[in-house]
Each structure stands twice: as C-alpha cells, then as structure tokens.
Image (cartoon, rainbow, N blue to C red):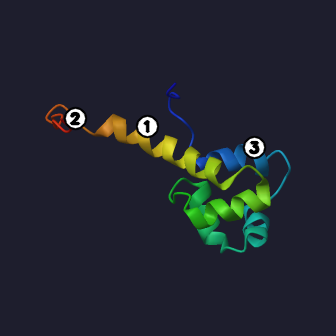
Amino acid sequence: MTMYNPPHPGKFIKEVYLTPFNISARQAADKLKVSPSTFSRLLKGENSISPEMALRLAKALGRTPESWLAMQDTYNLWHAKKRIDLNGVERLQVGA
C-alpha cells in the first residue's frame, strides 16, 4: 500500500526522537559523529539518508539500516511519482 505524502526521514527523526526527548540537533550530530551542519540539512529535508548515515542512525536511534533507507526510498518515490510524466513510456517486449 502506498503511503500518502510520507514524511521526509529528517522530519520523522525530529518528531519521534529529538523533540519528545529534548535532544538538540547538535547533541544528536555529536553522537552520530557527523557535523552539525550535515545533520541539520538532513533534519530540514535538504539531504537524503545515505547508506553510511543509515548505519549511524541504526546504531544511535535503533531500527535497521534497511528501514532508514526504505523510509528515504518511500519519500523519494512518492515525490518522483508526482513530477514524472510516464505517458510516453512504452513497455519493452522481453522474453520468448
């Protein structure tokens, strides 16, 4: 089932992990061993979760690295579906 307008993972991190537990972005960045500016861009939705960041998030916040990447993919795919016109794309005839 396709989620309607899934949140960017950065927004999810902020709303589920940082705000409720009064953790600053700077504190989280320190624990993740990334620069505060890198983590801030993720929280603002300006950066995507990379495999490296997924590993860091999994260790620091829990969940699997795969789940962090899946959340990013779901967000990216939903937005791609909204802006890409597939009307001219045709199916290839493959196989026997």
Instruction: Confirm whether residue 10 shows in the render.
Output: no
Viewer-proximal residue, 61 or 15? Answer: 61
User: Where is residue 65, by image quadrant?
Assistant: bottom right
Q: Secondary structure at mark 2?
A: loop
Which residue is farthest right? 21
Of circles 1 and 3, which is in front? 1
Residue at figure coordinates x 77%, y 61% from the top left: 59
Instruction: Confirm whether residue 84 shows in the render.
Output: yes
Contact (Cβ within 8 Å) of mark 1 with mark 3: no
- In which quadrant is the C terminus drawn? top left
Of circles 2 and 3, which is in front? 2
Q: Which residue is mark 1?
A: 78
User: Where is residue 30, by image quadrant?
Assistant: bottom right
Contact (Cβ within 8 Å) of mark 2 with mark 1: no
Viewer-proximal residue, 79 or 25? Answer: 79
Mark positioned earlier in the residue sequence (2 or 1): 1
Mark positioned earlier in the residue sequence (1 or 3): 3
Q: Amino acid at mark 3?
A: Val
Distance CA(mark 1)–CA(mark 3): 21 Å
Distance CA(mark 2)–CA(mark 3): 35 Å
Q: Amino acid at mark 1?
A: Trp
Asked if residue 34 is positioned above or below residue 80 in the image, the reply reads below
Q: Amino acid at mark 2?
A: Leu
Q: Which residue is mark 2?
A: 86
Q: Residues within 10 Å of mark 1 (few under 14, many from 20)?
A: some
Residue at figure coordinates x 50%, y 58% from the top left: 46
| Residue 16, label in figure | 3
Q: Secondary structure at mark 1?
A: helix
Contact (Cβ within 8 Å) of mark 2 with mark 3: no
